[in-house]
Image (spheres, rainbow, N blue to C red):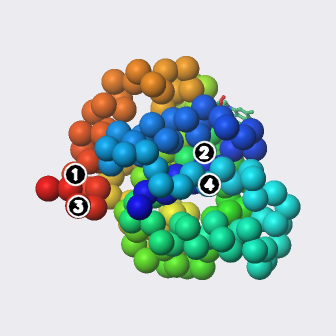
């Protein structure tokens, strides 16, 4: 079961579309669940919210995660951090995880590798390949994406 997490204050965003595309191309099937973190609303500002708990359960039962954010001020969004902060250290139990960020320019192409990866690893994600950064203007046709997929597919559970 593959799960996409999208941390964009704007719902149904390009970032979400890109993450769904990446998950589909990685596994050969659309993601089983997409968590648009903005839908969780104010429950993210405290602990023990039932909708947040339900979303966490979906995440921890995944076989593969794509975790996506737009680039805001050279890093991933505060909204995504609110959700990731809900997980304990190591809680993901080494689920294969693929970080993805979209940006307006290539100025922050290292942002997913330098800012998002460490947080994911802290909560127990296994991040087997370089984090992916795509331009918002050409994520659908990116040659970068094809090259990345060729490597990343080797780390999809069940791949042989
Ligand atoms: C508050 C804000 C800050 C942004 N900061 C950056 C940035 O530092 N670097 C960058 O490349 N793009 C930046 N952008 C552009 C967004 O990353 C880009 O438009 C986004 O990836 C588009 O995805 P979306 O359509 O899914 O929101 C910023 C956009 C906003 C709204």
Q: Nearer the viewer, residue 107 or 155?
A: 155
Q: Quadrant of residue 151?
A: top left
Q: CA distance from mark 1 to mark 4?
A: 25 Å
x then y, percent, for residue 27: 33, 48
Label 2 neighbourhood size at 10 Å, few (<14), some (14-19), many (20+)? many
Please identify, in this view, whether the residue under mark 2 or under mark 3 is nearer the observer. 3
Q: CA distance from mark 2 to mark 3?
A: 26 Å
Q: Are marks 4 and 2 in contact (CB under 8 Å)?
A: no
Please identify, in this view, whether the residue under mark 1 or under mark 4 is nearer the observer. 4
Horizontal relation, residue 157 to residue 123: left or right: left
Q: Is residue 137 above or below residue 12?
A: above
User: Which is more N-terminal, label 3 or label 4?
Assistant: 4
Q: CA distance from mark 1 to mark 3?
A: 9 Å
Point 64% across, 66% down: residue: 55
Q: Can you say which quadrant of the picture contains the N terminus? A: bottom left
For label 4, the residue is 35
x then y, percent, for residue 107: 55, 29
Q: Quadrant of ligand 1?
A: top right
For label 1, the residue is 154
> SS of the residue at dot 1?
helix
Q: CA distance from mark 2 to mark 1?
A: 23 Å
């Amino acid at each position: 079961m593959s799960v996409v997490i999208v941390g964009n204050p704007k719902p149904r965003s390009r970032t979400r579309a890109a993450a769904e595309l990446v998950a589909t191309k990685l596994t050969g099937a659309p993601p089983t669940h997409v968590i648009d973190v903005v839908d969780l609303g104010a429950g993210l500002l405290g602990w023990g919210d039932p909708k947040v708990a339900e979303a966490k359960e979906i995440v921890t039962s995944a076989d593969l995660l794509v975790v996506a954010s737009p680039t805001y001020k050279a890093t991933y969004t505060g909204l995504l951090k609110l959700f990731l902060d809900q997980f304990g250290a190591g809680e993901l139990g080494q689920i294969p995880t693929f970080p993805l960020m979209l940006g307006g320019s290539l100025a922050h192409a290292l942002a997913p590798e330098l800012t998002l990866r460490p947080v994911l690893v802290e909560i127990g994600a296994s991040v087997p390949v370089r984090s992916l950064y795509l331009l918002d203007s050409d994520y659908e046709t990116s040659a970068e994406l094809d090259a990345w997929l060729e490597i990343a597919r080797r780390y999809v559970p069940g791949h042989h």
